[in-house]
Image (cartoon, helix red, strand yellow):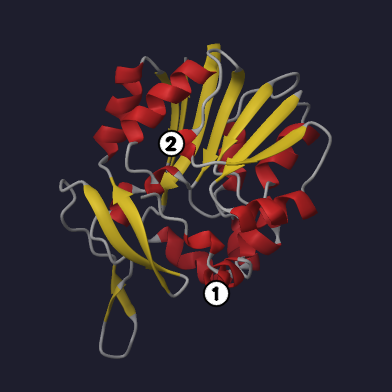
Amino acid sequence: MKENKYDDPAFFEQYGKMNRSQKGLEGAGEWYVLKTMLPDLRGKDVLDLGCGFGWHCKYAIENGAKSVIGIDISEKMLEKAKQINSLDGIKYDNVALEDATYPTETFDVVFSSLTFHYIQLFEKLIQNIYQFLKPGGYLVFSVEHPVFTAEGKQDWVYDEAGEKLYWPVDDYFKEGKRDTEFLGEKVLKYHRTLSTYLNVLLKAGFKVTEIKEPIPSEKMLQDFPEMKEELRRPMMLLISVQK
């Protein structure tokens, strides 16, 4: 069973209040790093896996992509994407990532933002992506960092006064399901070690081109002071690989 919390009205409403939902890419703390990892998009065919509100699809078209397909399991996400990020060259499909099928060597770039940690069959997905890509094509993606996902609760340890003491890391090498809480709801995610992410990519035939552990930019820290806590532990892992 593929979980889809984003079509739950209460969860979707809370998601819509997040900075990255309301402000688009400028509200995403990792974007200023992630965008530097993308290849030249001019004239390229792009696939966005877990496209959400379609901000990255819009960015790709505005930066010269020939075509973009954005897929997402959530109907509500795609309804919003079509409302606010519908440009010529963008097509949105309602399908789970694991069920997506495309002819061999269809895309120049496959992109995914903060989606792969929801996927149980990661190795199979990566094998499919390798087939979807043209020779020399790129896969660029972000996931929640293994340090962030390991313990499971995804919350700080607090002192008696409610101050954040430290981020717990436990059961790091015990991969698999994590019952987390996100936006006040129980959400199922999957923890993998850093070596698993990399070895699955290498086994599929990819060449690793870049790995980043981003921190918020100075502007983000000024605009959103609460993001200072993101300097205390890695929250995201960004990876670029080439076929």
Q: Is residue 19 above or below residue 133?
A: below
Q: Which residue is mark 2?
A: 98
Q: Position of residue 121 (x, y in %)?
A: 32, 37
Left or right position of 92 against 18: right
In which quarter of the view is residue 102 placed?
A: top right
- Image coords of residue 185 (percent x, y): 42, 72
Furthest toward the front, the residue is 1
The outermost residue toward the bottom is: 161
User: Residue placed at 48% from the left, 47% from the top?
Assistant: 114
Q: Amino acid at mark 2?
A: Glu
Q: Is residue 181 above or below residue 97?
A: below
Q: Left or right: where does residue 96 sit relative to residue 76?
A: left
- Disc 2 from disc 1: Cα separation: 25 Å
Mark identifier at residue 10: 1
The numbered mark, 2 or 1, whose residue comes first in the sequence reads 1
Image position of 9 with respect to 236: above or below: below
Q: Quadrant of residue 24?
A: bottom right
